[in-house]
Image (cartoon, grey):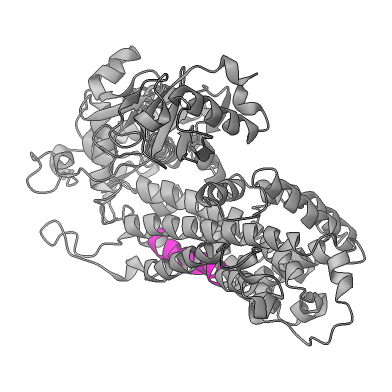
Amino acid sequence: MPRYTVHVRGEWLAVPCQSGTSTVGWLGKEAVRRYMKNKPDNGGFASVEEVKFYVRRCKGLGLLDLEDTVEDALEDNEFVEVVIEGDIMSPDFIPSQPEGVHLYSKYREPEQYIFLDGNSLTTEDLVNLGKGLYKIKVKINVAKNYMSCNSVFSSAKEDNWTGSFPAFSAVPWAQFLHFHPFSAQRTRMGGRGLRDAPSLELLKGRLNGIKRALTGVIFVFFLASCLPYIPEKGTVGASGDLAPLSHLALGLIGEGKMWSPKSGWADAKYVLEAHGLRPITLKPKEGLALINGTQMITSLGCEAVERAGAIARQADIIAALTLEVLKGTTRAFDTDIHAVRPHRGQAEVAFRFRSLLDSDHHPSEIAESHRFCDRVQDAYTMRCCPQREGAGFCAFRLCRYLSCKLDFHSYLCLNFSLKMVFAERAETISGGNFHGEYPAKALDYLAIGVHELAAISERRIERLCNPSLSELPAFLVTEGGLNSGFMIAHCTAAALVSENKALCHPSSVDSLSTSAATEDHVSMGGWAARKALRVIEHVEQVLAIELLAACQGIEFLRPLRTTTPLEKVYDLVRSVVRPWIKDRFMAPDIEAAHRLLVEQQVWEVARPYIEKYRREHIPESRPISPTAFSLGSLDPMGVGHDHRHQDEL
């Protein structure tokens, strides 16, 4: 029976054909049907019959005739793509990449606004702006600061202005960079950082050359979702993210490539024309002001902080499910144990385990089945989850501390200019706030901390797959030998963890002198941010594998049931991935579980039970958001201090 791997709107689907005489049109329709089945809203379609599409090969992008038979048109297990008519080509498709990724989605212009005042933008806000969930408006009080700063700036003598482009300024820096570009979301975030920089600096009286008219035009470009092609490599994070931001500014002046929902990828001047816009003309000092910042480090760092927090919360839920499958004990999560060592991260992880596994609140038939076993204690990968995963929370907490207390977007990153304007003193002063050392160090630490979530998860996957440790069938599948089950999935997890070990080497300990020894110490913050995100993505994927393995382990313990919140998690997973009866193409299942984690659906299912348990057991605690942190005595590591809320993060 021939089978094919079909790509539909970002999802890979394995589609078997009963015979080679089936048509390409039938293959496309069957792929769409399976895609709709996986979506709660049927993908926005009433029926398969109303969907119009065309089919092409993933390799070479050749279109296929819908009336041809699959045996004539395709090789067995060939990769093809179904493109639904009316979808907009994603900005993740770059024409210069012959074998690029091709994603399609409906573009919906956001209706809600975020108001910028230069102080209150959060990491969550920035990520949501990157996702295109909001439009932006600037608060009225910005104008007064604009006028004050511009007045001082205009009166500064030209010969006192020492901030300029480095040597060989006539060379267009952007021409040297043709690396893989950032996704649309990260381009929006980087552009958001650029576009918010003027308002941040205005309100602090630190305008460094950007005129009010230019800022207004930049906002218009952002609202139209005109996104320049920005390479992900090329910054050393010292005198700003010069090379990537040069590409961002390049689109503003009508050069280079640009994308918008209306035009797709095209030359920037044509994209702007499609929106009734014209390239901007830069005034003196504005070119430097646009590129001499660390918006790239900022935007990627904010995404890293948000994703790290999301996966850390869900890692506790997955670990609790694995502990149930491996018939572990909950005694190691006793409140008094963790009160002796009052680290907030450790206490919070232990609390979440109790909230999910407490037999008085959520009776578990699985736990009851081994209540009187002779096992004394569990392996460290289960018993020491609060201590190990709690340490990861410290890294996350430090980054949250920097973003909340020190203003990650302005104090650390966006006070970028070589010359700062202090309107209250009617003075301009050269400084070095463009240096990315602060966020580089924080993101290096974040990568190390969040990596531990995957390291301990991989060891739990090993225990699930090893029959001598789990008392379950080898590799979680019946008819072992004929079926390999989770054997290769575990290998994948091990490979990702090993790769993370290399990625966790701090980039900020490196420095190379640049710009004729003027910039003789650099932060390498751009690489710190990019590799932190890569580490986090690997962590998400490893935990997705553990989530699938734990749910598969539940199948062999039926008819026994686990606790109510963990049964809800199991039901969520089974809504997108069916149990393994025999071997099948596993990549789509791992991707489906990964998507549940990225979209925080696992957390949202378990969260009501955790919050209810918190209300019942810590009645004096104030309500908190899932990413809120009580800074208390400004102890960023959460050690000691403010014990009344020690279970909070």
Give the residues drawn in magenta, as a range.
439-455
Q: With 429 as the anchor, is 593 left or right in this view?
A: right
Residue 182 is left or right of residue 286, and the answer is right
Query: Relative to the observer, which residue lies in front, 441 or 488?
Result: 488
Task: Identify the main secondary structure in magenta.
Answer: helix
Q: Nearer the viewer, residue 378 or 366?
A: 366
Residue nearest the viewer, comparing 12 with 198: 12
Percent coordinates x, y for residue 617 in the rendering: 88, 63
- Is residue 447 shown in magenta? yes
Question: What x and y, as percent, mark residue 484?
Answer: 55, 64
Magenta stretch: residue 429 in it? Answer: no
Residue 123 placed where, x, y %? 53, 47
Vertical placement of residue 627 versus 154, above or below: below
Q: Is residue 328 visible?
A: yes
How many numbered badges does the structure rendering display? Answer: 0
Identify which residue is drawn at 50% across, 50% down.
Answer: 587
Question: Is 338 on the left or on the right of 124, as rendered?
Answer: right
Question: Which residue is farthest right?
Answer: 360
Taking the image as shown, residue 210 lies to the left or right of residue 223, namely left
